[in-house]
Structures are given as C-alpha cells and as structure tokens.
Image: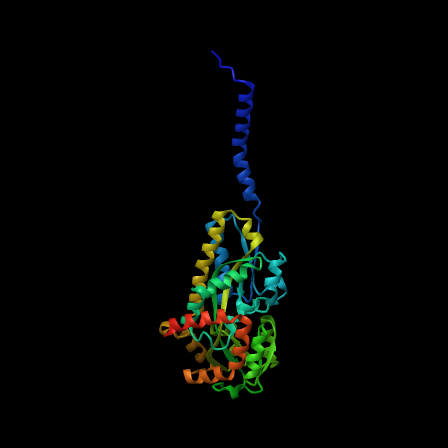
Amino acid sequence: MTATIPPASRRTLLLGAAGAGLAIPLRVRAQQQYRPEYKVSVVGNRPIPLSDGAFVWADLVRERSGGRINMKVYPGSQLVGGDQTRELVAMRQGVIDMAVFSTINISPQIREMNLFSLPFLLRDHRGFDAVINGEVGQDLFRVLATREVVPVAWGENGFRELSNSRREVRRPEDLRGMKIRFAAGVIFSEIFTALGANPLQMSFADLQPALSTGAVDGQENPVNLFLAFRMDTLAQRHLTIWNYVADAGIFVVAKSIMDGFNAADRALITDAAKDAARQQIANSRRGIGIGGDRSAIEECIRRGVAVAELTPEEKTAFANATRPVFDKWAQTVGQTLVQKAQAAISRATS
C-alpha cells in the first residue's frame, strides 16, 4: 500500500531536502570567501627578530590551516614605500591586512604607545615583561582596538642601544654635537636634544646609506639588528649598552579582515601569533647577557667594536639629563598609565 503525502507535507519535505542539500555548498562558499592572500607588513627583514616573527606567524597559520589561509609577508615596509610610520594608516585604509608593528612606529598616531619610549623607564627585560603581560599591556591593547585593528599578541624587537662612529659614549656630554638617526616620534628628537646631540629622523631604508656616507654619526637599535645589518662595516665602531628605551612589537589584524574569519580561524590566527611572539622575544634576547648568554655582545667585540656597558650609576646620569623629557611625555602618554607601569616595574624588579 502506498502512503499518500498531503500537499503541505510534501512542500515541507522538499524545503527540508533543499535546505539539507544547500548546507555543504554554503560552507564551501563561506571558505571560498577567504582571500587567496593576506598582506602582512613588517619593518626590516630577516634575520632581525621583529621581521622574523612575521614570517614565523605566516608559516604557522598556513600550516595549521592546511593552506586555507595564506599570509604573505612584505618586509621592509614595502607596502608603504619603506615609510614604517604609515603602516597603521595603511592598514585602516585597507592596503595592509595584517602586521607586526613596532610601537615606536605607531606612537605618532597613538600617543599611549610612547610609554615604551619614556627614557629609562623600563631598564631591563623584567620591567618590559611586567608591562606587556599585565594590566598595562591589556590597557594598550584596548586603546589599539579603537583604531579598527585587532591586537593579538605582544612581541619584542629589543632594547635600543646606541652606536656611533666617533667616540665612546659613557656620559651625557659625550653625545654633544653628534648627528644621531632616530626612526620616528618627536620624543626621540627631544631625548637626543636634551643630551646635546643633533637628532635626524629617517626611515630604516635610508639609514644604512646615511651611515656609510657619514651623513649621520650614529643610530640607536637593538644589538641583534646591529649585528644582522653589519653596522660595524658602516663605521659604527662604538656601541653603548644603555637600555634607554624598549622596542615593543605588536601582532595585529585589521578588524575588517578578522571579522571575515570564522571563530575557529580567528582563534587559530591568534594562537599562531602568540607562539610566533614567544619565539620572537626569545630571539631578540639571545646573546645580550640574559641568563649568562653574551654571545651577541662578544660577537660585536670580535668584529672590532668597542662596547661600553654602562653601570647603573652611569645610566642614572643619562636618566637625570633626560628627566624633563620623561615628565613632559608622561603627561602625553597619560599619568595613570605611566603610574601603573611604574608600579608593575617596581614589583618585578624589587
């Protein structure tokens, strides 16, 4: 006996079957909406830690997504013509999808990021870790999130040390008259002016030729970058280890891009960024004395660079000379944020 299905029920079954048949194609189409390539910007190039972190992030995401998410790294800030200070603006304009920012390069647009550039605030990696891993780090992420980007991990490029072609620098007066290159931010101009130097702003792409021609006498960058780009061959014969500011890194995704991923892939991208950031931080600290590993310092000496490692008393002299700059910019950063940072640093280093 054949059952008779009422017309209304037949319509329900047909709609249900159609819905079931459409389920898989819709999921496929959702995946196909992912772009064939996501552009990742970073200043510099391998092997410096900040840049390497961007490549590791892209590799991890590609591997863990089975090739569904392809992040292509554009080193040297080439998506913004080498001007690393334009990366945040370009991301908000849709030119860049993802990035590993240096906080120095975005501080002209986000005043709170100047926290890391307050002279002699952080002093060492313990103070740095206390800031990025605590309430202050969360506060800064919330600020960044208001700029249409999603911060997913804190990284590090390292403490910035001073090199020059002219003489040993151990006292503030040793800097008088020197032409010192800085990357970005008025605060750096004011720091070096307070020390009697002549600060010059220029992109990293322009730095090496400027050193080779003597257009500038010196520069400030992490030790590992000094070694990677063979600045010892560019007449930089003196290196001062003073840890005057830290260069923090931030792994970010444009909000419009992050919103386009499903929840599982958002978590995948975030977790990969955190893993890449941990590796980046380890690389930035290799060989500079932490845990007894001084291989980077010793390599500088082997290359004929005179390394001056400042004592706490010598650093205090520089801190005192730049204190008016600190006090002025603490107001710009925000006194509450600075006080939180100081308290966290004190707890970590006491």
- 286, 94: nearer the viewer: 94
- 228, 277: nearer the viewer: 277
Quadrant of res 75: bottom right
Query: How far across and how far down the image is residue 72, in percent?
Result: 55, 56
Q: Residue at x 56, y 81 (%)?
A: 192
- Number of callouts in the render? 0
Q: Can you see residue 67?
A: yes
Q: Residue at x 61, y 80 (%)?
A: 213
Residue at the extreme bottom of the image, as rendered: 173
The answer to whether 302 appears left or right of 45 in the picture is: left
Query: How far across and how far down the image is residue 304, in percent?
Result: 47, 82
Residue at the extreme front of the image, as rendered: 336
Question: Can you say which quadrant of the picture contains the C terminus?
Answer: bottom left
Query: How far across and how far down the image is residue 81, in percent?
Result: 63, 65
- 304, 176: nearer the viewer: 176
Q: How is the image coloured?
A: rainbow
Residue at the extreme top of the image, as rendered: 1
The answer to whether 129 appears left or right of 175 in the picture is: left
For residue 77, above or below residue 214: above
For residue 81, above or below residue 323: above
Q: Can you see residue 47?
A: no
Q: Residue at x 46, y 62 (%)?
A: 277
- 311, 350: nearer the viewer: 350
Query: How far across and how far down the image is residue 114, in percent?
Result: 53, 71
